[in-house]
Amino acid sequence: MGECIEVVREGAVARVWLSRPDVHNALNGQLMSELVGALRELAADDGARVVVLGGRGRSFCAGADLAWMRQTALSGGANNAEDARVLASLFESIDAFPKPVVGRIHGSAMGGGAGIVACCDIPIAAARARFGFTEVRLGMAPAVISPFVVGRIGKPAARELFLTGARFDAARACALGLVNRVEPDDEALDRAVDETVAALLMGAPKAQAACKELARTITDQPIEVARETTARLIASLRAAPEGQEGMRAFLERRPPAWQPAAGEGDGEG
């Protein structure tokens, strides 16, 4: 818990809320520092298996706090560059987080906010959510978020949306692959998030970490390297305690040890 974020634990589920609702959860140095710190703690917490990332108030995240950015820009070259690196580390910490991250997206997700969406494993949006990479209209570029955004929506769409700065709706965000699902309203959004969390809790934690890293990195490897990487991975997972437990549980027609008891992990934050 901090001044700019809230962490609500519900058993194996950690709901992390951006909490600057008066400025639509705009990103400043303190919010970013608190969020990176919370993710670091949750990564090391074996009891936390799924993170749900959302925003308090009317928006998910309106992007960078322009007052903070202007002050940073005027503070000198070294400070300006360091704050940009901190911003980059925020997106990296979400993208590389070793557990599933579900995005609960409502209201505005602009600039860096849309970048956070791109870093979530399973972002789900309300139909009225709005997105945009609007930096060009402020004389800037979506620089530090670009690797994650291009990885999700591809170069052609990124070129258009980065160059125009145009805003777009949840339906287009889903068509582009920026979000995975669109729900008609906030109530349906919460149901979809809870259903997704329940499905994730059925999976084995170490296997999920391996799946996430595989999806993030495998296409960057030449096929001959990927062949060896994937062969070693499946061999190690089959022999590991989780793999052995999963196969035993299947053969014995019982739930594996990592699956929660009925009702565990449910609830709202």
Image (tube, grey):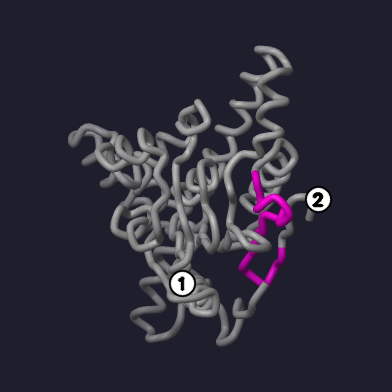
Q: Is residue 196 magenta?
A: no
Mark in the foreground, 2 or 1: 2
Residue type for callout 1? Thr
Numbered disc 1: secondary structure: helix
Which residue reaches farthest top?
77
**Earlier along the polypeptide chain: callout 2 or callout 1?**
2
Residue position marked by numbered label 2 in the rendering: 3
- The N terminus is located in which quarter? bottom right
Nearest the eye: 200 or 171: 171
- The C terminus is located in which quarter? bottom right
Q: In the image, what residue occupies the spot 63% across and 30% down? A: 86
The x and y percentages for residue 268 are 64, 76
Q: In the image, what residue occupies the spot 61% across and 68% down? A: 13
Residue position marked by numbered label 1 in the rendering: 196
Measured Cα–Cα span from mark 2 to mark 1:
28 Å
The x and y percentages for residue 55 are 63, 59
Please tell me in which quadrant of the rendered image residue 146 appears: top left
Residue type for callout 2? Glu
Which residue reaches farthest right?
3
Q: Is residue 230 left or right of residue 63?
A: left
Span colored in magenta: 8-26
Crowd tier of the residue under label 2, counting other residues whose Cα lies within 10 Å: few below 14, some 14–19, many 20 or above? few
The x and y percentages for residue 253 are 38, 86
Nearest the eye: 242 or 69: 69
Q: In the image, what residue occupies the spot 47% across and 57% down? A: 130
